[in-house]
Amino acid sequence: MAKITRDEVVHVARLARLELTADEVETFTDQLAKVLDHAADVEALDVGDVPPTAHPYPLANVLRPDELRPSLDRQAVLDGAPVAEQGQFRVPPVLGEAP
Amino acid sequence: MTAVPTPGVNALDIARSVRAGDRLAVDVVDEHLAAIAERDGEIHAFNLVMADEARQAALAIDRRVAAGEDPGPLTGVPVALKDNLCTAGIPTTCSSRILEGWRPPYDATVVERLRAAGAIVVGKTNLDEFAMGSSTENSAFGPTRNPHDTSRVPGGSSGGSAAAVAARFAPLALGSDTGGSIRQPAALCGVVGAKPTYGRVSRYGLVAFASSLDQIGPFARTVGDAAALFEAIGGHDPCDATSIPRPVPAVSAALDRGVAGLRVGLVSELLDAEGIEPDVAARVRQAAEALEQAGAKVDDVSVPAVIYGLSAYYLIAPAEASSNLARYDGVRFGLRVEAPTTGEMYDRTRTAGFGAEVKRRIMLGTYALSAGYYDAFYGKAQRVRTLILRDFQAAYERVDVLLAPTSPSTAFPLGAKTSDPLTMYLNDVCTIPSNLSGDPAVSVPFGTGDDGLPVGVQVLAPALGEEVMFRVAAALEPAVPAV
């Protein structure tokens, strides 16, 4: 596997919605490369015929009866938000124009 | 009334005396609050001490006892909660700026169960931000210090909970364990810390880090107390779809059954793993001898795939974390950094709110899941996880429990491993395999290393094997070498 590049770090930061300074890009490129180097042992294994484990104690189709039951109080949930208005979470414009 | 101060008294002894009316819960709480006030400035185990709430809860317990009621098996026992467990109306920060000031609208299931058992929550403990770390140095609110030597780390990520129990601020605490975050700090602080089987304890109200690995578990100063706390919090919860629909075994009742006839395996790969200090390995072998003298049959056992555990974990856990932490975007909880558009608001909020280690893991996980790398990294790590599960299953056909070190070394100095993330990650080499397999494991204090600091021995058991796990742990307790 090729080493992770600065450009990839910048791309991944954008995907993760993080703004990195030039110094941070440098540091992360270095540090992520080290961790991925360590993971080379896993990468090198031939495990094509081994099924993946997503969950150590598989439970299938966990359902509950489709019955009404009390949920969290709306105001209590909105109280935790940075900005709420008219019973909803308020955010800045999404498409750029003023509301 | 007895004059012996309760800080330092075991949980079950406190519960017994409060239930019997020999002590008042409010006195127990006041004495522990005094211990916290006296020394937590130095240790920083707590992000928040809930003095008023704890006293009110204690007075309510005392009224119930006076009225002839039995509030439960943990009546009047102070408990410290890792600050990634939701408490209704009480700040829950995950030691992150991004959740500073947020008050959850509900209690975690474990918090409800603690109250139902008569226990009293005394505060929220410090952790590595979002439970990512092995030293509690990644907290946005400053590090916790090891009560045995304040120049050293308490381990992590549940370092505040481990330190609180070791410093006698509370006889019990809860932590969460994704790659060793209960067991490793327990070892470094000289207390008992257990990670139950994945799904044994409801995670409803535990702030998610890596959902296929996270598990809540107990800290205590004795195996008996840890077992009692496990019984109080365990069992099926319809609010957690990954919760195992089975009753929790009565582990306490089996603690004194001894180990005669049990087969115990020493995990060769973990005794010889990278960076295991010789004095730590020696204590593990000494623990094996103690079990042999108590009638167990001890053998070396190979679990070959565990050597890939660390690599697989540091792909799987960050991948799941990058997804779980996508929810911190300035809309619904905690911090928002205002910006002209929602997209910029997301970016600025996350950039300002997350610390360096959290950003590092989000980056690593996003990379491991990104187009072109998913199969090579995340997909492959999941297949390696299957190998580890299979090797453990094969080992448990030969033995009933496994023994290993908990941490490669005793507590290290603050700052010793902060400059190189990989060096820090290597602390988890012995604990990670149980998270990947989902099996239970407990760290029991077993003497000290050459530096006089606590060493933990780890007892690993097959899935749902908490009974035999705690039984073996209890058998180690009387054999602990004198310090």
Image (cartoon, helix red, strand yellow):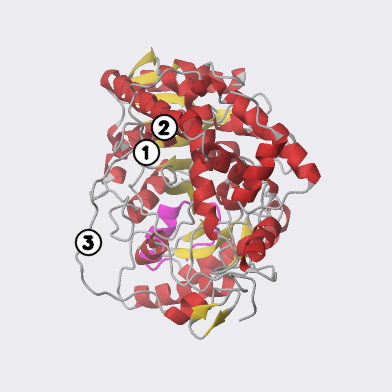
Are the residues at dot 3 and dot 1 in contact (C-beta closer than 8 Å)? no
Graded by Cα atoms within 10 Å as few (under 14), some (14 to 19) or many (20 or more), the crowding at tag 2 reads: many
* Mark identifier at residue A64: 3
Q: Is residue B430 visible?
A: no
Residue B296 sits in quarter: top left
The answer to whether mark 1 and mark 2 are in CB contact below 8 A is yes
Chain under callout 3 = A
Above-or-below relation of B237 to A85: above
Q: Nearer the viewer, residue B123 or B5?
A: B123
Image quadrant containing the C terminus of chain A: bottom right
Instruction: Determine which quarter of the picture holds residue B21.
Output: bottom left
Disc 3 crowd rating (10 Å Cα; few below 14, some 14-19, many 20+) is few
Badge 1 is on which residue? A54
Q: Is residue B206 magenta?
A: no
Residue B35 screen position, x and y as percent = 63, 59
Q: Chain of mark 1?
A: A
Count how many numbered circles sit on residues in the image. 3
Outermost right residue: A23
Q: Return the x and y of residue B249 as percentages of the image width and height.
A: 26, 45
Q: State which tag comes first along the sequence, 3 or 1.
A: 1
**Residue shown at 34%/47% (left/top)?**
B199
Q: Which portion, as a residue range, is magenta?
A: B1-22
Kindly report the distance in space between the C-alpha atoms of the residues bearing marks 2 and 3.
Answer: 29 Å
Which residue appears farthest toward the bottom when viewing the image?
A86
